[in-house]
């Protein structure tokens, strides 16, 4: 344990966020366990992914955004609300620009692009949060300890497994090869180590804008769930049963967040 305390907080932030990315990679690898693409199974997984993303948007992003705004003496409604709406608006703009520049693009490829974009945006503030937690130790900020930072990293890492699934499985359902679905799934988590280092280096400045970015990522995710994932999985003839898997996905992520929060 003494060796842990002797490490640079910035180096520890890098190690921690590499760990969270690795768990995302493990979640993305679940696509290799499906030998044949069964529409019903993949629709169920897509529905679970939607539930995971909805729950993660609140417990991993919006709730921490509100709590951090309060701790920083900011308006607890303003920054989260503006961030949330801005996140959804960005995805709308990205969709319009992407579609305009690729007029012949299929709806499947467009959905894939939006899904990857939203999850990647979600992982940036998570990486920043871990980096800030470790970097705060350098400044002796109240409540900032190595163990609390490690606990945060472990919590995010465990949550990243279903999030890796939430990317790779829908991509596989849209017709991507297993290798491509896995690649883009783990790639969405690779931004966390980069964001972690930035958070640790710029801890005092990042803390001020983190409430906005957390809510921003939540808005982006909710928009994609409402616009793409739920309508797509509801094309299944057993839409009532498929909807139950959205609830199951929500509960899975809720339990992870509450127990590890």
Image (cartoon, rainbow, N blue to C red):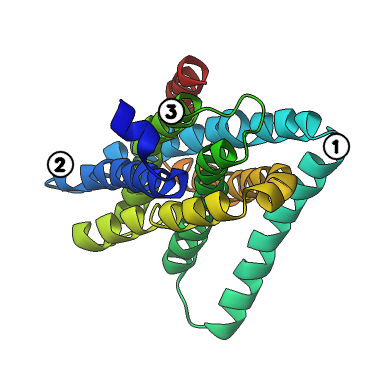
Whole-percent x and y of residue 170? 37, 49
Vertical side of 190 occupied by 4: above or below: above
Whole-percent x and y of residue 4? 34, 33
Residue name at image x 50 percent, y 49 percent? 123
Whole-percent x and y of residue 67? 72, 28
User: Where, by quadrant of the figure, is residue 26 drawn?
Assistant: top left
What residue is shown with label 2?
A: 33
As helix, strand or loop, the secondary structure at mark 3 comes to helix
Q: Please report whichever mark, 2 or 3, sits nearer to the chain's N-terminal start.
A: 2
User: Where, by quadrant of the figure, is residue 109 drawn?
Assistant: bottom left
What residue is shown with label 1?
A: 74
Whole-percent x and y of residue 106? 45, 72
Q: Contact, CB < 8 Å: mark 2 with mark 1?
A: no
As helix, strand or loop, the secondary structure at mark 2 comes to helix
Q: Please report whichever mark, 2 or 1, sits nearer to the chain's N-terminal start.
A: 2
Vertical side of 150 occupied by 229: above or below: below
- Whether residue 199 sits left or right of residue 8 in the image: it is right
Q: Please report whichever mark, 1 or 3, sits nearer to the chain's N-terminal start.
A: 1
Would you call the spot at circle 3 few (<14 residues within 10 Å), some (14-19), or many (20 or more)?
some
Disc 1/disc 3 C-alpha distance (Å): 26 Å
Numbered disc in front, either 2 or 1:
1
Residue name at image x 42 percent, y 53 percent? 193
Disc 2/disc 3 C-alpha distance (Å): 25 Å
Q: Which mark is residue 155?
A: 3
């Amino acid at each position: 344990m003494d060796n842990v305390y002797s490490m640079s907080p910035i180096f520890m932030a890098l190690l921690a966020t590499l760990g969270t990315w690795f768990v995302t990679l493990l979640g993305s690898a679940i696509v290799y366990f499906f030998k044949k693409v069964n529409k019903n199974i993949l629709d169920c997984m897509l529905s679970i992914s939607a539930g995971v993303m909805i729950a993660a948007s609140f417990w991993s992003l919006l709730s921490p955004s509100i709590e951090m705004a309060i701790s920083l003496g900011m308006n607890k409604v303003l920054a989260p609300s503006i961030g949330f709406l801005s996140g959804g608006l960005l995805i709308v703009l990205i969709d319009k620009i992407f579609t305009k520049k690729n007029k012949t693009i299929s709806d499947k490829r467009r959905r894939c692009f939006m899904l990857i974009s939203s999850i990647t945006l979600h992982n940036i503030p998570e990486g920043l949060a871990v980096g800030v937690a470790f970097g705060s130790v350098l400044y002796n900020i109240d409540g900032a300890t190595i163990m609390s930072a490690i606990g945060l990293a472990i919590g995010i890492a465990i949550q990243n497994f279903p999030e890796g699934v939430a990317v790779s499985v829908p991509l596989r359902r849209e017709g991507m090869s297993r290798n491509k679905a896995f690649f883009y799934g783990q790639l969405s988590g690779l931004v966390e180590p980069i964001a972690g280092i930035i958070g640790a280096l710029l801890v005092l400045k990042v803390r001020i804008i983190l409430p906005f970015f957390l809510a921003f990522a939540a808005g982006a995710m909710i928009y994609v769930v409402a616009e793409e994932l739920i309508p797509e999985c509801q094309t299944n003839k057993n839409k009532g049963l498929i909807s139950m898997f959205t609830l199951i996905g929500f509960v899975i992520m809720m339990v992870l967040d509450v127990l590890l929060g």
